[in-house]
Amino acid sequence: MKMGILGAGGIAGTMAGTIREMPQVTSWAVASRSLEKAEKFAEKYGFEKAYGSYEDLVSDPELDLIYIATPHSHHYEHIRLCLEHGKNVLAEKSFTQNAAQAKEVLAMAEEKGLLLTEAIWTRYMPMRKKLDEILASGVIGKPSSLYATLSYPIMEKERIHEPSLAGGALLDIGVYPINFASMVFGDDVKEVKATAVLTEKGVDGIMQITLIYQDGKMAVLHADANAASNREGAIYGDKGYIMVQNINNCEGIRVYNKNHELIAEYETPKQITGYEYEVEACMEAMKKGALECPQMPHSETILIMELMDSIRKQVGVIYPGETL
């Protein structure tokens, strides 16, 4: 499979370094608004071609899949650009700026018969399946609540502090605790309660979210763009609890009984970076002629975007030109 990357920033570099180690993937082309930047990126990561415009990239007839690695604020525009040129797309999280944009581009992809999926890597990782198996075994009994936190001191980054780039903690890092809760408890949410500390520019620097489910379960989620956290996820049941080390890229799972005794421990399989699993999922979907990946179906992407819309509306984070 010949793969291209739209954007040449930090996350693009992680993906480029990943596919370089995947023998089934050819690092074909990268595009930046600066040809010089694209050429340096291509040389560093071994791409065949470098383009100084995104339009040139999507016009390349050799490309099978394009990975979008631009800020959230630009995903909608760049997904549309790829689809208009008949390209399958793997779009970085958060998928779009809001649910309306997500619904539009997903409908467009389906109409054109193209694969479009969200690169929320935690959905594709083997440890997600392992967690499902542990929960299904009943080892912790009936789960009733969970807690998940993910924080990094990244407020100085332009994509985080600028409203014009759809900044804030929620869309960049809060999306992971939300997806963790969704993977464990599903999406039948009855009530959403959110509080946030907003920056001077009006984006969320710290976000706290409580989700109450129809069946009585509760998830408490935390994200902070000003500080570091232990990145843990915890699932509490009547017979014990599960601790997930690093909900962003699982580093291991520990299971305890109700007496706080460690009864099982699971190690993460060796990986390149963790990004390879979403690329493999795209390849499998394309091979089957599928328009979505089962790990992150279109309906799930829309539900998560709608939930984040409701959270932003509740705390008063509205981006320029946007109506929620």
Image (cartoon, rainbow, N blue to C red):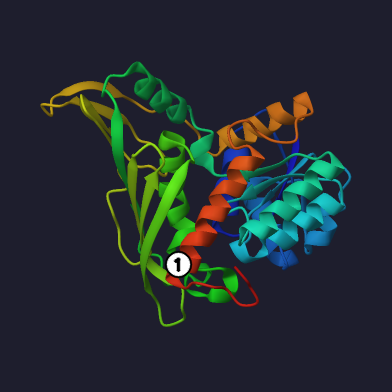
For the C terminus, the quadrant is bottom right
Q: Position of residue 288 (x, y in %)?
A: 76, 24
Residue count near mark 1 (Cα–Cα under 10 Å), binned few <14, some 14–19, many ≥20: some
**Would residue 239 appear left or right of 209 to someone viewing this image?**
left
Q: Which secondary structure, mark 1?
A: helix
Q: Residue at x 37, y 58 (%)?
A: 193
**Would residue 79 appear left or right of 85 to someone viewing this image?**
left
The answer to whether residue 269 of the structure is visible from this angle is no
**Would residue 204 appear left or right of 113 to someone viewing this image?**
left
In the displayed structure, 181 sits above or below 319; it is above
In the image shown, does 93 or 158 lie closer to the viewer? 93
Q: Residue at x 20, y 26 (%)?
A: 256
Residue 225 in which image quadrant: bottom left
In the image shown, does 231 or 42 lie closer to the viewer? 231
In the displayed structure, 95 sits above or below 159; it is above
The answer to whether residue 154 of the structure is visible from this angle is yes
Q: Residue at x 57, y 73 (%)?
A: 319
Residue found farthest to the left: 259
**Would residue 222 appear left or right of 301 to someone viewing this image?**
left
Identify the residue under disc 1: 314
In the image shown, does 35 or 281 lie closer to the viewer? 281
Q: Position of residue 199 (x, y in %)?
A: 40, 77
Q: Residue at x 51, y 68 (%)?
A: 167
Residue found farthest to the bottom: 200
In the image shown, does 172 or 216 lie closer to the viewer? 216
In the displayed structure, 195 sits above or below 23; it is below
Q: Position of residue 185 (x, y in %)?
A: 41, 36
Q: Position of residue 134 (x, y in %)?
A: 35, 22
For the N terminus, the quadrant is top right
Q: Amino acid at mark 1?
A: Gln
